[in-house]
Amino acid sequence: MTRVRLDLGYDGTDFSGWAVQPGRRTVAGELGLALDRLFGAGGATGLTVAGRTDAGVHATGQVCHVDVPDDPYGDSLVRRLAGLLPPDVRVYRATVVPDVFDARFSALSRRYEYRVTDAPFGAEPLARRTTLAWPRPVDLDVLNAAAVGLTGQHDFAAYCRRKEHATTIRAISRLDWRRLPDGVLVATVEADAFCQAMVRSLVGALLMAGDGRRPVDWPASLLSRTDRSNEVVVVGPHGLTLVAVAYPEGVDALAERAEVTRNLRA
């Protein structure tokens, strides 16, 4: 078997997230069907993704790996997958990688972007599937000032949907906002990993500070809580896109990172 890294993107609007779910359309489900048609049922195994996006969340820089029978299609794998996948999922690159590469555990960080418009008319019609319409004017300087207190390693229990036996401690290396020439606000957040609904909760809290309904230090003050805060608005999934996943270079570094991450998650 040969391990192959797949770099892909998708429009998450019509998907119930990444993970396979009985009776629901998912990204992994569609990709798995395409791989079964290429390699036979069960011929491709161990499909593993870097970030399990929720229903409605998009990706332009998603990464997964899969083990296939000696990579028989070589350079034509991307073209063959293009002919089998639906138009809202595209595999951009297929790269043979060492067996120690793990799309999930070898990752150093994931970077997301969240798009928001505070225009009085809402989102542009062609951007409505990727941009949240916020009903109040937002101050960019306040957004960035409020974001400062959320960077670094913290317990983000107030911003996460807690899972049994799972930690809510995360390390955010980047959280900032910019306003594009067309007026759209873009939040960029990067961390070693994220718990469920964390990014959308962070964005919701920051927008409440940015539109003046909460003080600038309110989002950071929630980090002292040990349970999820009901005051935090979880914004819609359609504004969120996974744009990049970073990995170390070299076989030894990949294996070492995977081991460290597994220990952290345990």
Image (spheres, helix red, strand yellow):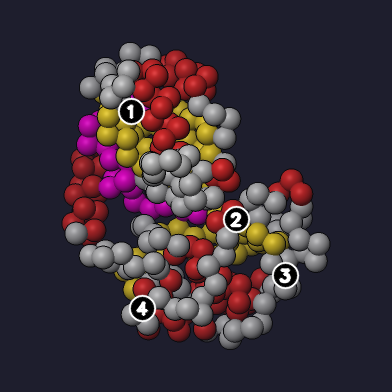
| Badge 3 vs badge 1, beta-carbon distance below 8 Å | no
Is residue 230 left or right of 131 when viewed as pictured?
A: left
Tell me if residue 12 is in the magenta stretch. Answer: no
Residue at image point 46% right, 47% down? 17
Residue 241 to residue 235: above or below: above
**Of the residues shown, which amino acid type is indicated by label 1?**
Val
Q: CA distance from mark 3 to mark 2?
A: 15 Å
Percent position of residue 202, x then y: 50, 69
Kindly identify which numbered label has been placed on residue 4.
Answer: 1
The N terminus sits in image quarter: top left
Label 3: how many residues lie within 10 Å, few (<14), some (14-19) or many (20+)? few
Of the two numbered discs 2 and 4 in the rendering, the one whose residue sits closer to the viewer = 4
Q: Secondary structure at mark 4?
A: loop
Query: Relative to 120, is 15 on the left or the right?
Result: left
What residue is pinned by disc 4? 227
The quadrant in which residue 140 appears is bottom right
Badge 2 amino acid? Gly
Residue at 45% over, 62% down: 197
Q: Is residue 2 left or right of residue 138?
A: left
| N-terminal-most mark, 3 or 1 | 1
Q: Quadrant of residue 122?
A: bottom right
Which residue position holds label 2? Answer: 239
Local crowd size for mark 4, using a 10 Å CA cut-off: few (<14), some (14–19), many (≥20):
some
Disc 1 and disc 4: Cα gap in Å? Answer: 39 Å
The earlier-in-sequence mark between 1 and 2 is 1
Q: Is residue 227 above or below residue 193?
A: below
Vertical side of 229 occupied by 102: above or below = above
Indicate yes or no whether the magenta region holds residue 96. Answer: yes
Q: Amino acid at mark 4?
A: Asp
How far is disc 4 from disc 3 in space, using C-alphas? 28 Å
Magenta-tinted stretch: 94-114
Secondary structure at badge 2 equals helix
